[in-house]
Amino acid sequence: MNGEFQIEYVELPNGRAPAREFVDSLDDKASARIDAFIERLRVSGNRMTGKFVKKLTDDIFELRVKQFDRIFRILFFFQPGRLIVIASGFQKKTQQTPPGEIAKAAQLMRLWMKYRNHYSGSKLEIESILKELGL
């Protein structure tokens, strides 16, 4: 593994992965650029700082990707064992990262920390978790 990190996406109990869905919803060039930056993050991990990675809270970081006049942000967190968990993504339209996006990533991080993408599969549990998330 050569000191590289593993990338995982937060998955909801219904199987959706919000960050992956965001990237996949973009045009091919934008999604390819974001995927290339995620690959750089996988190789460099916590050594990738400066203009590409910014710490937003104690736990949440943003990967900054610019393509022409568009700016994209991928929010993620680190876990022991050289794991990077990608929580969400959005297209940035303001100078500051919107607090709602940070709160959403923090909520997805708590979900991942509790279940680590392993849900029992019971319909009641899935409905309860989605209701708690407001989905």
Image: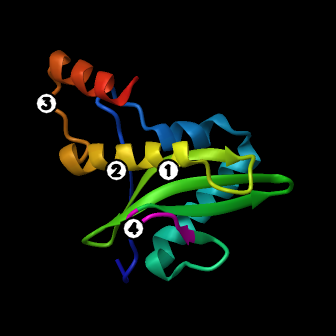
Q: Is residue 54 above or below residue 95?
A: below
**Amino acid type for the residue under numbered disc 4:** Asp
- Between discs 2 and 4, the one toward the N terminus: 4
The image quadrant of residue 127 is top left
Q: What secondary structure is the magenta-colored segment mainly?
A: loop
Rendered residue at 31%/21% (across/down) = 131
- Between discs 3 and 2, the one toward the N terminus: 2
Q: How many marks?
A: 4
Q: Nearer the viewer, mark 3 or mark 2?
A: 2
- Between discs 2 and 1, the one toward the N terminus: 1
Q: Is residue 134 above or below residue 123?
A: below
16 left or right of 124 in image: right
**Amino acid type for the residue under numbered disc 1:** Ile
Q: Nearer the viewer, mark 2 or mark 1?
A: 1
* Residue underneath mark 2: 109
* Residue underneath mark 3: 120
5 left or right of 34 in image: left
Q: Between residues 67 and 133, which one lies in front from this camera angle? A: 133
* Residue underneath mark 4: 58
- Is residue 56 covered in magenta? yes
Measured as percent of width and height from the top left, residue 55 is found at 51, 69
Residues under labels 3 and 4: Cα distance? Answer: 30 Å
Residues under labels 2 and 4: Cα distance? Answer: 12 Å
- Start-end of magenta stretch: 54-59
Name the mark on residue 102. Answer: 1
Residues under labels 3 and 2: Cα distance? Answer: 18 Å
Q: Quadrant of the N terminus?
A: bottom left
- Between discs 1 and 3, the one toward the N terminus: 1
